[in-house]
C-alpha cells in the first residue's frame, strides 16, 4: 500500500494548528488557522503533487532547519511557489486572506505572538511534528 501524502499534509497541518493554538493561548485567529476548506483543498491535490510538496516540506524542516510560520513550512506556500503562482492565487488565502494583508489570519497571529513575546514554532517542534506524521501515516 502506498503512502498517502495528502493525508500526511493534512496531519502535518492539524498538528501545526494544534501547536499554534496552544502557543497563542487559543487566540481566535489561531483557532481558525487551518479550517475545513483547507482540508478540502489538500484532499483535491494530485497525489504526485502532494508527494512533491511533502518532500519539499521535509527538506525545508529536516535539512534546512526551517522554523516559524513561514513560506518554508506552509503547504500552500510551497504549492504556490511550485507552480509559480502569485500569492493572490494561494488557496489558503481564500479563507484567511493573503499573508501580507493586515486583516489576514497570518498577520494577526504573527503580530499577537510578537507583541506577547511568544516563541514561534521552532525547528525542533516541526521535526517532532514530521516524526509524528511519518509514524501515523504510512
Image (cartoon, rainbow, N blue to C red):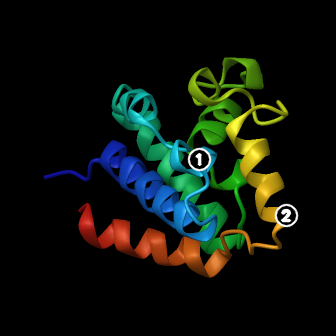
**Which residue lies at the image location 56% right of the left edge and 71% below the top edge?**
126
- The tag on residue 131 is none
Q: In which quarter of the image is the C terminus?
A: bottom left
**In the image shown, does 26 or 57 lie closer to the viewer?**
26
- Residue 130, given in percent of the width and then of the height, sits at 46, 69
SS label for mark 2: helix
Label 2–label 1 contact, CB within 8 A? no
**Which residue lies at the image location 86% right of the left edge and 63% below the top edge?**
115
**Which residue lies at the image location 42% right of the left edge and 49% below the top edge?**
9
Kindly report which numbered mark, 2 or 1, lies closer to the viewer in this rendering.
1
Question: Could you tell me how many numbered marks the image carries?
Answer: 2
SS label for mark 1: helix
Quadrant in which residue 93 is drawn: top right
- In the depicted structure, whether residue 28 falls above or below residue 67: above
- Residue 14, given in percent of the width and then of the height, sits at 41, 54
Tell me which label, 2 or 1, sits earlier in the chain: 1
Horizontally, residue 136 falls left or right of residue 124, namely: left
Horizontally, residue 113 falls left or right of residue 73, namely: right
Residue that numbered label 1 is attached to: 28
- Residue 13, given in percent of the width and then of the height, sits at 47, 52
Horizontally, residue 116 falls left or right of residue 24, namely: right
**Which residue lies at the image location 35% right of the left edge and 35% below the top edge?**
47
Q: Residues within 10 Å of mark 1 (few under 14, many from 20)?
A: few
- Residue 94, given in percent of the width and then of the height, sits at 60, 21
- The tag on residue 114 is 2
- In the depicted structure, whether residue 25 falls above or below residue 55: below
Amino acid at each position: 500500500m502506498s503512502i498517502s501524502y495528502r493525508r500526511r499534509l493534512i496531519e502535518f497541518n492539524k498538528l501545526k494548528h494544534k501547536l499554534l493554538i496552544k502557543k497563542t493561548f487559543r487566540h481566535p485567529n489561531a483557532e481558525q488557522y487551518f479550517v475545513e476548506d483547507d482540508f478540502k483543498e489538500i484532499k483535491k491535490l494530485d497525489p504526485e503533487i502532494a508527494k512533491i510538496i511533502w518532500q519539499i516540506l521535509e527538506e525545508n524542516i529536516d535539512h534546512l532547519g526551517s522554523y516559524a510560520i513561514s513560506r518554508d513550512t506552509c503547504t500552500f506556500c510551497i504549492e504556490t511557489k511550485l507552480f509559480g503562482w502569485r500569492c493572490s492565487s494561494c488557496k489558503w488565502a481564500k479563507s484567511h486572506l493573503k499573508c501580507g494583508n493586515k486583516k489576514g489570519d497570518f498577520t494577526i497571529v504573527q503580530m499577537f505572538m510578537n507583541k506577547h513575546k511568544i516563541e514561534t514554532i521552532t525547528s525542533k517542534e516541526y521535526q517532532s511534528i514530521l516524526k509524528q506524521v511519518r509514524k501515523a501515516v504510512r
